[in-house]
Image (cartoon, rainbow, N blue to C red):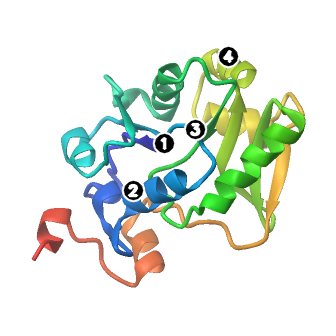
């Protein structure tokens, strides 16, 4: 689970913004814990101390030593922490509407056919969770340029990627204050300002 970003467009640590009974990141962690995943690894970076304080003991925390290198570096840091896994499920810490069923759907695709990769197709919109086989992760290590994983799996796939249908709207990606307002109807206050 990637939670290392600086959240520059949000202007505050979006992972810690209130959502439901907890936080944006907390919602994704809860879905992962309720899913069929064997282990949950959260990669932190920017805002690491604050993010790590809200995580439970059942979560493995990996710090990206240089999160300014982008999402790919965080993905590989997390994958290295579970080097014995045949496949990993990539989750984003700013997709709080992610459900355990979404995760289990790509896990089921893996168990059925062992694809190179699987992505969720929410009524025609492809987004995370993504499942990446160990072979796919090896290819990701060699990719370069902006958004290499998205290009490799969605825009310009060089292999067949399994699209797993999910019959609901795609989770909102909370990158900007407008995204957060669309999700909650509220303005994104810094976490410390939202505390009573």
Q: Secondary structure at mark 1?
A: loop
The residue labelled by disc 4 is 138
The residue furthest bottom is: 185
Of the pair 195 and 83, the residue shown nearer to us: 83
**Alpha-carbon span between mark 4 and mark 1:** 18 Å
Q: Secondary structure at mark 4?
A: helix
**Alpha-carbon span between mark 2 and mark 1:** 9 Å
The residue labelled by disc 2 is 25
Residue 87, label in figure: none
Whichever of callouts 3 and 4 sits on the residue coming sooner in the sequence is 3
Residue 196 horizontal side relative to residue 109, left or right: left
Whichever of callouts 2 and 3 sits on the residue coming sooner in the sequence is 2
Percent position of residue 1, x then y: 48, 42
Q: Secondary structure at mark 3?
A: loop
**Circle 2 Cα neighbour tier, 10 Å, few/some/many (<14 / 14–19 / ≥20):** many
> Is residue 94 something that shows in the picture?
no
Residue 38, label in figure: 3
Residue 8 horizontal side relative to residue 123, left or right: left
**Alpha-carbon span between mark 2 and mark 4:** 27 Å
Residue 1, label in figure: 1
């Amino acid at each position: 689970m990637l939670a290392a970003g600086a959240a520059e467009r949000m202007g505050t640590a979006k992972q810690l913004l209130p959502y439901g009974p907890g936080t944006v990141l907390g919602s994704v962690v809860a879905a992962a814990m309720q899913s069929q995943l064997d282990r949950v690894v959260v990669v932190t970076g920017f805002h690491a101390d604050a993010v790590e304080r809200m995580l439970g003991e059942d979560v493995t925390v990996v710090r990206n030593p240089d999160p300014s290198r982008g999402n790919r570096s965080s993905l590989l840091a997390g994958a290295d922490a579970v080097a014995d896994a045949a496949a990993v499920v990539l989750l984003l810490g700013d997709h709080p509407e992610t459900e355990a069923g979404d995760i289990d759907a790509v896990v089921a695709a893996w168990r059925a056919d062992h694809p190179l990769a699987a992505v969720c197709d929410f009524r025609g919109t492809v987004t995370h969770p993504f499942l990446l086989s160990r072979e796919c992760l090896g290819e990701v290590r060699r990719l370069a340029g902006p958004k290499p994983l998205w290009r490799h799996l969605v825009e310009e796939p060089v292999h067949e990627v399994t699209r797993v249908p999910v019959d609901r709207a795609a989770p909102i990606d909370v990158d900007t204050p407008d995204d957060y307002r669309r999700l909650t109807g509220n303005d994104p206050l810094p976490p410390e300002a939202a505390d009573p």
